[in-house]
């Protein structure tokens, strides 16, 4: 959609989309939480604690989704020079980092009753922690470089370099001996999780995804407006300087 | 070809001439290994078990200390602008500078490791393989450090930012490096599979990292 490259058009579209999206997210969370707590059965081994899965798994999926979004946006910055690509990558980093943190914390809380430990250095947890550190690196790099063009390109390069971590996270439970559960949903041969839980998980995953999109659109609007304010301030200073002479 | 070799010779000579950089990195390596047992306790059995890990972590940190100078000095005095517009393609320039960093930092650190292993009660029969593993893994360390150095060119407090950006990328090198060294120290597992993975990581970084470093240098100079 070439027209979305125009920031004004994007702001307009996002502004109209956000209220509807917010309402939809609220409804989906209401349904999803109801399904998670009252419809999905307790696990035969884990009992009620399995319900943390309905937060932990979507958060983990979105952590990876966020980084994939950053990787694609980085390609947009470096190869296609799309005007909004660097804004997309910039605002996705804190949101993705937060979802990664949610996944790590909820996983840790789930691990204590299930595995007997808050943390273990197996392949899945280590690669998720590395993902969190990569997000932090991106945020730090954005803040460290003042000139926005250079910041966008540098962050795009770093984003692409770190993208190798995403397949490592996905396949870590297959390639290494890990404590973390192997793939039971996105796998060859179809999901092995029961339908009663799969429905709740799917609704929660959709709710989380739309929440990500909502937060991302709001953050993109804020960033575009922030850059406009900065540009206007700079013009003001320039005019004042010219008027002095 | 002669231009590339001339650049390599220049960078290696400059690294030695500065004096500070290599000596500082080796000194840092020594200091970190020296204070580690003071923090962990003098139990020699424990130290022998964790020696490969400590030696690798300290090597990564020491290499990061000196990663700055891969591009920084040339950036400061304008030589990097000349190199960017010169006859050699910029990825090749980045690769040569990374190679110079490996020759003047990675190799000395790897060769010093057995001596420092004495402080940590590393078994003598493990030393040759430890050096071999480090020589196989340090090219990856240098070439990935060049990515960080090019991303943080000219920034304030770039040292800390460089470490934050590059250390997560070092995780595979560290895991396989320690795995290779530990397998040589103890255990029935063969050290050769992790060693081969280290070689693979180094070869991949030698090819791919200069592309990223060159793109970052171009972004920094624009």
Image (cartoon, rainbow, N blue to C red):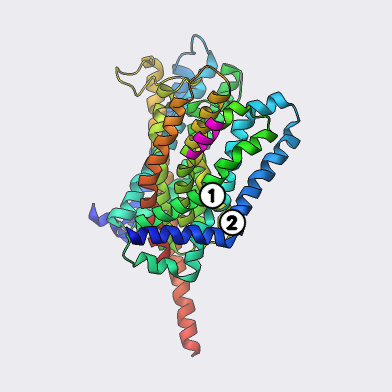
For label 2, the crowd category at 10 Å Cα-Cα, with few meaning under 14, some 14 to 19 and many 20 or more, is: some
Q: Residue at x 75, y 31 (%)?
A: B41
User: Residue B49 placed where, x, y %?
Assistant: 64, 25
For label 1, the crowd category at 10 Å Cα-Cα, with few meaning under 14, some 14 to 19 and many 20 or more, is: many
| Residue with the most extreme left position | A2
Q: Residue at x 76, y 30 (%)?
A: B42
| Residue with the most extreme bottom position | A245
Report the front residue among A147 and B155: B155
| Range of residues picked out in magenta | B128-135
Q: How many numbered marks are there? A: 2
Q: Which mark is residue B105?
A: 1
Quarter of the image that includes the N terminus of chain B: bottom left
CB atoms of marks 2 and 1 within 8 Å: yes
The residue labelled by disc 2 is B21
**Quarter of the figure with residue A197:** top left
Q: Which mark is residue B200?
A: none
Q: Is residue A51 above or below residue B195?
A: above
Assign a secondary structure to mark 2: helix
Magenta segment includes A126: no
Q: Main secondary structure of the magenta part?
A: helix
Report the front residue among B153 and A237: B153
Q: Is residue A25 above or below residue B98?
A: above
User: Residue B46 placed where, x, y %?
Assistant: 69, 25
Assign a secondary structure to mark 1: helix
Magenta segment includes B132: yes
Report the front residue among A211 and B148: B148
**Quarter of the figure with residue A117:** top right
Answer yes or no: is residue A2 visible: yes
Q: Chain of mark 2?
A: B
Measure the C-alpha gap from mark 2 to mark 1: 8 Å
Q: Residue at x 25, y 56 (%)?
A: A3
User: Residue A199 placed where, x, y %?
Assistant: 37, 21
């Amino acid at each position: 959609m070439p027209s979305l490259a125009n920031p004004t058009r994007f702001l307009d579209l996002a502004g109209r989309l956000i209220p509807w999206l917010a309402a939809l997210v609220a409804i989906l969370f209401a349904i999803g939480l109801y399904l998670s707590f009252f419809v999905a059965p307790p696990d035969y081994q884990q009992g009620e604690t399995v319900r943390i899965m309905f937060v932990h798994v979507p958060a983990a999926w979105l952590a990876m989704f966020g980084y994939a979004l950053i990787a694609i946006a980085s390609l947009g910055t470096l190869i296609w020079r799309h005007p909004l690509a660097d804004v997309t990558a910039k605002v996705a980093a804190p949101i993705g980092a937060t979802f990664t943190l949610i996944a790590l914390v909820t996983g840790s809380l789930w691990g204590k009753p299930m595995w007997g430990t808050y943390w273990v250095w197996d392949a899945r947890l280590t690669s998720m922690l590395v993902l969190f550190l990569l997000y932090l690196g991106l945020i730090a790099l954005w803040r460290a470089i003042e000139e926005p063009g250079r910041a966008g390109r540098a962050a795009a390069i770093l984003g692409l370099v770190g993208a190798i971590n995403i397949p490592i996270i996905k396949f870590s439970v297959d390639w290494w001996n890990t404590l973390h559960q192997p793939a039971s949903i996105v796998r060859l041969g179809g999901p092995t999780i029961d339908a009663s839980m799969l429905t709740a998980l799917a609704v929660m995953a959709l709710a989380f995804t739309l929440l990500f999109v909502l937060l991302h659109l709001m953050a993109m609007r804020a960033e575009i407006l922030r850059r406009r304010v900065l540009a206007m301030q700079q013009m003001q200073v320039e005019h004042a300087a010219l008027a002095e002479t | 070809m002669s231009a590339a070799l001339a650049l390599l010779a220049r960078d290696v000579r400059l690294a030695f001439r500065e004096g500070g950089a290599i000596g500082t990195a080796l000194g840092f390596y020594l200091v970190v290994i020296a204070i580690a047992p003071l923090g962990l306790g003098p139990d020699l059995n424990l130290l022998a078990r964790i020696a490969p890990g400590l030696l690798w972590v300290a090597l990564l940190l020491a290499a990061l200390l000196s990663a700055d100078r891969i591009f920084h000095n040339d950036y400061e005095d304008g030589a990097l602008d000349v190199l960017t517009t010169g006859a050699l393609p910029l990825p090749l320039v980045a690769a040569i500078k990374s190679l110079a960093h490996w020759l003047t930092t990675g190799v000395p650190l790897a060769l010093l490791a057995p001596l420092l292993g004495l402080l940590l009660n590393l078994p003598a029969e493990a030393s040759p393989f430890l050096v071999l593993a480090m020589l196989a893994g340090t090219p990856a360390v240098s070439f990935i450090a060049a990515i960080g150095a090019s991303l943080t060119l000219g920034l304030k407090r770039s040292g800390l930012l460089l470490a934050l950006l590059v250390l997560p990328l070092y995780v595979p090198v560290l895991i396989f490096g320690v795995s290779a060294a530990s397998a040589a120290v103890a255990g029935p597992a063969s050290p050769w599979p992790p060693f081969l993975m280290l070689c693979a990581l180094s070869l991949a970084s030698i090819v791919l990292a200069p592309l990223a470093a060159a793109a970052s240098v171009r972004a920094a100079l624009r």
